[in-house]
Amino acid sequence: MRVVASASAEQLIEESGGRLYVWPKKARCCGGLTTLACSSRLPAGRAFRHAGATDRVEVRVPVDLARLPDEIHLEVRGFRRRVEAYWNGCAWVV
């Protein structure tokens, strides 16, 4: 999986340890739309594996994730400056 990260996303991830955990999250509304959640901390009770990296950061996904996207995009968004992830440029997972 190719990791495409903005410089600000790489910097924010590096400041939090250099590793980003990304997993699909199914919404309870909107017909069960699946989006991506991410954190610099390992979510409790879940196992993750290496999926890709840049020179500065590593991306991990759940071990039971059957299919990886061709690429994952990482951007910094919001007033509180959080990293958001997009599979193949999309905000949702098909």
Image (tube, rainbow, N blue to C red):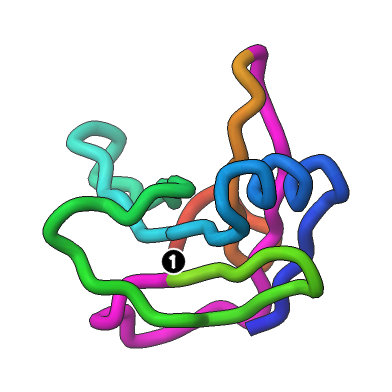
Task: Say what amino acid the circle numbered 1 marks.
Answer: Val
Say left or right for 23 vs 87. left
Say left or right for 87 vs 40. right
- Assess whether residue 7 is covered by the magenta stretch: no
Residue interval drawn in magenta: 61-79
Quadrant showing the C terminus:
bottom left
Considering only vertical position in the picture, is 29 above or below 71?
above
Say left or right for 79 vs 54. left
Quadrant showing the N terminus:
bottom right
Closer to the camera in the image, 53 or 26: 53
The local secondary structure at tag 1 comes to loop
Crowd rating for badge 1 (residues with CA inside 10 Å; few <14, some 14–19, many 20+):
few
Q: Which quadrant holds residue 93? A: bottom left
Q: Which residue is mark 1?
A: 94
Closer to the camera in the image, 5 or 71: 5
Say left or right for 13 vs 54. left
Q: Which residue is at a point 39% across and 48% down the rendered structure image?
A: 41
Closer to the camera in the image, 92 or 73: 73
The percent position of residue 17, horizontal first and vertical second, equals 57, 53
Closer to the camera in the image, 48 or 31: 48
| Residue furthest out toward the left | 45
The percent position of residue 77, horizontal first and vertical second, equals 68, 29
Q: Which residue is at a point 44% across and 46% down the rendered structure image?
A: 39
Q: Which quadrant holds residue 57? A: bottom right
The percent position of residue 51, horizontal first and vertical second, equals 52, 81
| Residue furthest out toward the top | 79
Q: Which quadrant holds residue 23? A: bottom left
Q: Which residue is at a point 83% across and 50% down the rendered structure image?
A: 6
The percent position of residue 87, horizontal first and vertical second, equals 59, 64
